[in-house]
């Protein structure tokens, strides 16, 4: 159960980073964007990607993560825009030996659906977390919701720290029939703490961070891979940009909020 929750959180954050956009400034095509191999040379590319994704309005995705030798797969779709009310997301994550976890974001509310055999202490299949709650758990998941509902926060790692990334154009490729350009994105050891917003005394997770991006001529992300700071590997593919995304909240009688579950099922009061 603990692993399921951790993977769900990681998946939501990765989805937010890769699928949401920033303030739109009009259409920009990557064929007009030059990157340099010096630190900060990808700023124009990152901003063009943020603009293009916001203009598209929605995206579908598939993902796989390999952490500690265990592979987790998932898929979903997200719709995003200028305000939190415009943001909806649905995602299903298959976790080995534990079952299928469902994640929904509807009108700014975060829902997690656990499989019956997960051991989660409630008869209702859905847990909801109040992003405005003052307990530590709600605050932690509330920050994830904020990452998704704030259309600029999700791309901050690339756009706001653009001066710390080194970008190298690797070459041309094709993904599902779409012509793309591959870029290798690297963060040096001395910049990892700032990019990941780690405390000054924190131990660095790796000697460097690396991402690979495949971007089409309209500046839309088509694939993203990462070494997860040395903890494993992650790959996401993106498609169906601009297609409608319909997400509905679970029936009220199938949902319990996290604070109530702790109090009624475990006798813990937050």
Image: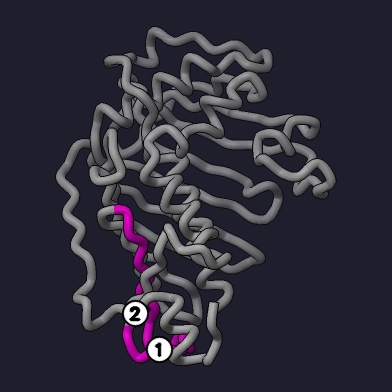
Mark 1 neighbour density, 10 Å: few (under 14) some (14–19) many (20 or more): some
Q: Nearer the viewer, mark 1 or mark 2?
A: 2
* Observer-nearest of 121 and 225: 121
**Marked residue nearer the N-terminal end (1 or 2):** 1
- Position of 211 relative to 116 (above/below): above
> Which residue is depicted at the point 55% across and 23% down?
170
Residue 154, quarter of picture:
top left
Q: Residue at x 64, y 55 (%)?
A: 232
Q: Is residue 71 visible?
A: no
Magenta span has 116?
A: yes
What residue is shown with label 1?
A: 122
For label 2, the residue is: 256
Label 2 crowd (10 A; few <14 / some 14-19 / many >=20): some
Instruction: Quadrant for residue 40, please give it.
Output: top right
Q: Position of residue 111 (x, y in %)?
A: 35, 67
Q: Percent x, y for residue 200?
A: 81, 41
Compared across the picture, whether 2 is left or right of 93 comes to right
Q: Decide: is 246 above or below 82.
A: below
Residue ID at (60%, 26%): 161
Left or right of 63 in this view: 226 = right
User: Going 36% across and 62% down the picture, which residue do you hit?
Assistant: 110
Is 266 drawn above or below residue 18 in the view shown? below
Q: CA distance from mark 1 to mark 2?
A: 8 Å
| Residue 270 in sight in this render | yes
Residue range (magenta): 108-124
Q: Quadrant of the C terminus?
A: bottom right
């Amino acid at each position: 159960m603990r692993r399921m929750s951790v993977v769900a959180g990681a998946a939501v954050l990765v989805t937010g980073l890769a699928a949401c956009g920033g303030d739109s400034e009009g259409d920009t095509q990557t064929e007009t964007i030059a990157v340099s191999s010096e630190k900060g040379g990808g700023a124009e590319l990152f901003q063009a990607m943020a603009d293009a994704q916001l203009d598209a309005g929605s995206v579908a995705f598939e993902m796989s993560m390999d952490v500690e030798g265990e592979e987790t797969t998932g898929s979903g779709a997200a719709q995003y825009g200028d305000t939190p009310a415009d943001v909806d997301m649905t995602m299903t994550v298959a976790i080995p030996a534990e079952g299928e976890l469902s994640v929904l974001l509807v009108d700014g509310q975060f829902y997690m659906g656990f499989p019956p055999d997960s051991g989660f202490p409630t008869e209702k299949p859905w847990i909801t977390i109040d992003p405005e709650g003052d307990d530590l758990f709600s605050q932690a998941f509330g920050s994830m919701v904020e990452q998704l509902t704030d259309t600029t926060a999700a791309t901050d790692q690339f756009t706001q720290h653009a001066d710390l990334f080194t970008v190298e154009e690797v070459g041309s490729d094709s993904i599902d029939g779409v012509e793309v350009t591959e870029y290798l994105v690297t963060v040096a050891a001395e910049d990892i703490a700032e990019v990941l917003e780690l405390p000054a005394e924190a131990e660095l997770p790796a000697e460097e961070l690396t991402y690979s991006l495949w971007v089409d001529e309209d500046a839309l992300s088509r694939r993203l891979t990462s070494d997860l700071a040395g903890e494993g590997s992650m790959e996401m593919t993106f498609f169906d940009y601009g297609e409608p995304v319909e997400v509905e909240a679970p029936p009220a009688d199938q949902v319990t909020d996290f604070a109530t579950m702790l109090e009624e099922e475990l006798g813990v009061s937050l």
